[in-house]
Structures are given as C-alpha cells and as structure tokens.
Amino acid sequence: MPRRKFAWEKLTDEQLLAQPLNRLRVAVEGTWLADCVNTLYEELEERGIRLRPHTWISSEWFSPADVPGIAIPFYLAHPRLMKLEKKMMLDVEGASWSECMAILRHEAGHAVQHGYQLQRRRRWQQLFGPSSQHYPRYYRPNPASRNYVQHLRLWYAQSHPDEDFAETFAVWLRPRSNWRTRYAGWPALKKLEYVDELMGEIAGKRPQLATRERVDPLHTLKQTLAEHYRKKQAFYAFTPPKTYDRDLSKLFSADPRHYRRPPAAAFIRRHRAQIRQLVARWTGENQLTLDAVLDDMISRCRELNLRAVGPEQKLVTNFTILLTAKTMHALFGPSRRKWIAL
C-alpha cells in the first residue's frame, strides 16, 4: 500500500514545529505500526488471550487506567516526524521493530490488567503490591535486584506495582524469551509463574472492560510541535553538577608542554555522538540528558584549557567509562532523578 502524502512533509523543521499536533492527521492504519500491532495480536491469540487492545495516535506511549487500549506517539507514524523527533530528542523511542514490539508488549500488559481487572486479585496484590499505590515522582531502582524482571530501560519494573506487572507480562509474552531458564533462581520467577498461571485461567474469556475509549487522541491536541518539544525537553533537562574538573584533569592534560595537542573540548565534540549513544545503551539514560552533561564537560575542558594527549582510541574508551560512571552516580547516587514515564 503506497504511503499517504501530507502537505507538511515538505516543510522545513521550523515550519513543521509551528504546526499544531491535530493537523498532522497521521494514523496507525497503513503504516509499519499496523504490522507491529497485528504481530502483537498474533502473540496474544497464540496464548489464548481474547483481548485485542485498540490503538490510536497520541503524543506519547501510554495505556490509560480503566481503558484496555494503547496510545502510540505520533512521530512513529511517519519518517518525516521520526526525523524531527531525532533532531529534537536525539533519540526515537520505539523506532526499530524490536523496540516497538517491546513497548507494545509492555503496554499490552497494562491493557490486559485493566481489561480483566487483575489488580483486584489478592495474589496479584501479594506479588506486585497495591495498584492504588501513588505513582512516585521519583524512583530509585536497585540494578542488582532479582525481585523484578528486566525488560525496558532503567529497571522500569521497580517504579510501581502496575509497571512491575506490565514488565513481567511483556517478558512472559515475548516469543522464545525462555523466561524459565533466564530467571531461574530469581525471586522474580514467582511473578512470571503466576502470570503464566493467570493467563491460563483467563484464556478464552471475555474481558470485563470492553470500552474503546481513546484518551488524548491526536485530533484533540492543539499544542504546536514546538510547544510539545519544549515540554518534553524540559522533562529531561537538569543542571549538571560541577564535579567533573578533577576527573577531566586526570584524563586530559593542562600541562603547557602539550599546547600543540588537540583541545580536549574539540576531542569530545568529535566523538560525542558515538559516546552518547553507547552510554545511553549501557545505562538506559536519555540521550538528551547525556548531551547536557557533554555540553558541560566541553565547557569545563575549555575553561581548564585541557588537551587530548595519548592514543585516541584509549582516550575514547576512558572518556566513555568516565561518562558512564558519572551517569550511574546521577541515576543512583544521593540526588534523585525524575521518574521516567512511558
């Protein structure tokens, strides 16, 4: 099927950012997202689950409370919008088939929970906790914990009982996940076995909630793309701590003898995209946040007049380790970080 044409496809970034979201008029149907959703339905059918979460386009990924459906962010519905998302956020969450399917399985977990009201069961509450628990502004995961499965980034299962269930469901649903072997000896295995038992119990049954409501569908969102991205960027913004000087001075050189060597600031700028992507993959941190840290490090290198001395690949490796260490400290150190919602 040929892709639908839109007048805004040919606009410059500046012109496109001035467009209201409701004028984009993109949909799941007729795009690669429809194939992803159909694959999700096939996976649910294979497990005997009758619920088919309805999907719609909105501003972000979410599955609303008491609505057994899934909202998908607008940018995934068109390559031009993905390109703008990449420019504004440095990353496109869900842009690959595997990442999109991982998020869809997670959101399907929420939809199944809502559709069958699973959170009302006593055993569910014993294993995952009360669904009524307030969503925190912050959560401080323990990366070493074996009480939770590991599916989406930043140990997301640890943020709330509903997310714990959705993540456990996603691991259980994924074909060939081999979860019994992967989580052997982990306390999280009890949750997976419960989900396996529970899904067997509801197999073939109609969901209790069958509403097709769409929360915040794209056609109701009047903010411009520029307003949307200002808000989204602000969510990940933070003031980097001025704790880099000692580490940067160890890695690079302020010795006047090395004045002919390349400036450390230029070295970081040259390798920033490669290093940023690598550290984001290792830590789960958002690339926009890492870019703010890199900007600050570049500024400090310039002010300290540091030079890049030594084999380039070794410097790249050591700088990547430094940024990873600083990121992990920011995520799990004394200063708490924002809760990252999907």
Image (spheres, grey):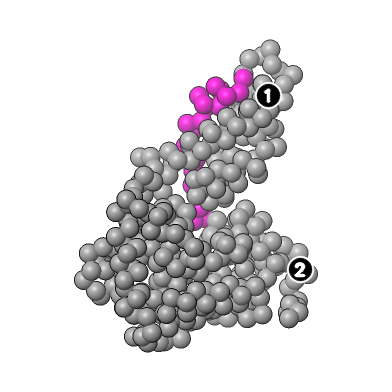
Seen at 50% across and 53% down, the residue is 236
Looking at the picture, tell me which residue is in the foreground, 296 or 214: 214
Secondary structure state at the residue bearing disc 1: loop
The N terminus lies in quadrant: bottom right
258 up-or-down from 165: above or below:
above
Whether residue 141 is visible here, answered yes or no, is yes
For the residues labelled 2 and 1, say whether their Cβ atoms are less than 8 Å apart. no
Sequence-wise, the earlier of marks 2 and 1 is: 2
Left or right, 143 with respect to 315, comes to left
Would residue 241 be counted in the magenta stretch?
Answer: yes
Q: Position of residue 294 (x, y in %)?
A: 59, 39
Q: Which residues are magenta?
A: 234-253
Seen at 65% across and 34% down, the residue is 268
**Disc 2 residue type?**
Leu
Q: Which residue carries the number 2 mark?
A: 11
Picture quadrant where residue 169 is located: bottom left
Q: Which residue carries the number 1 mark?
A: 311
Looking at the picture, tell me which residue is in the foreground, 38 or 308: 38
Left or right, 334 with respect to 22, comes to left
Seen at 55% across and 56% down, the residue is 233
304 up-or-down from 37: above or below:
above
**Disc 1 residue type?**
Pro
Secondary structure state at the residue bearing disc 2: loop
Q: In the displayed image of the protein, which residue is found farthest to the right?
A: 10
Please identify, in this view, whether the residue under mark 2 or under mark 1 is nearer the observer.
Answer: 1
Whether residue 209 is visible here, answered yes or no, is no
Mark 2 nearby-residue class (10 Å; few <14, some 14–19, many ≥20): few
Q: Position of residue 141 (x, y in %)?
A: 36, 49
